[in-house]
Image (tube, grey):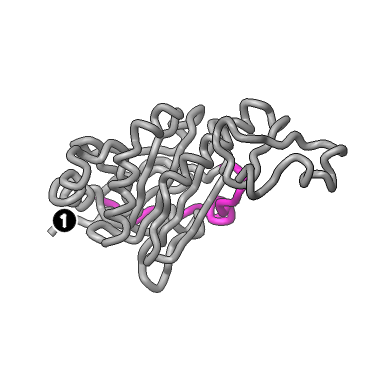
Amino acid sequence: GCARPTGANVGQPETEKSGPAPEVKKEAAMEIARVGAKAPDFQAPAYYRGTFTEIKLGDFLGKWVLVCFYPGDFTFVWATEVSAVADNYDALQELGVEVISISVDSQFVHKVWNDQELSKMVNKDIPFHMASDGAGNVGKVYGVYDEDAGVDVRGRFLIDPDGVIQGMEVLTPPVGRNIKETIRQIKAYQHVRATQAAEVCPAGWEPGKKVLKPGPELVGNVWKEWNPKEDH
């Protein structure tokens, strides 16, 4: 069978792959991922476009990053999710978004899954990094590791170019996420960033739809600016 990875490294320099799983430093262990805060950095082995490599979240600073945790390779719901993300990868790239998927499976199992199933679903290799969190260290810091099951649950984290988590969603394994909604949210956050928060995006916002301009005059008067039947 395939060798199990030694585990992803959170907040530590790279260690020998043949050694024991690296432990999270005490200060790193206290740094739990949360909205509006810097995303905890991590380094992990990965499978990427036919090669085995190492990936470090900090290397993507200056870009939007979508980090997707999932329970495991060869699982049913994630096969539909990862293929949907791959099918929309060009749209994500146009928005300047990099994607990292991550589970406790080794980079070797990621390759086998790509070759045997995923590439047949999207008629190409998965175009983004498939990282390995063998010891669950990354999942623990991001609050998605299930100690009893020994897997990362279904979690999505949207990180802006400053390395700040703007959005997160965590689901139990039976229900998949909607990449179209993720793309909509990315566009909305990018609009807010472009206007330096002078404009914010109401429910269901799409480019070209009404925005709101926060200020004292808007307090109690949102009803004058936005109608759920017409603007949603």
Q: At 57% from the left edge and 37% from the top edge, which residue is drawn? A: 188
Relative horizontal placement of residue 217, taking residue 18 as reference (left or right): right
The amino acid at mark 1 is: Cys
* Residue positioned most to the bottom: 148
Q: Which residue is mark 1?
A: 2
Let me know if residue 28 appears in the view: yes
Let me know if residue 20 appears in the view: no
Q: At 53% from the left edge and 31% from the top edge, which residue is drawn? A: 161
**Front residue (pair 161, 95):** 95
Q: Residue 32 in magenta?
A: yes
* Residue positioned most to the front: 230
Task: Measuring from the top left, give residue 198's x and y in whole percent.
Answer: 73, 30
Task: Give neighbour class at mark 1: few <14, some 14-19, many 20+ (Cα, 10 Å).
Answer: few
Magenta highlight range: 18-38
Q: At 34% from the left edge and 56% from the top edge, which residue is drawn? A: 21
**Front residue (pair 171, 61):** 171
Q: Residue 181 in magenta?
A: no
Task: Measuring from the top left, give residue 109's x and y in whole percent.
Answer: 20, 53
Task: Measuring from the top left, give residue 97's x and y in whole percent.
Answer: 43, 33
Quadrant position of the N terminus in the picture: bottom left
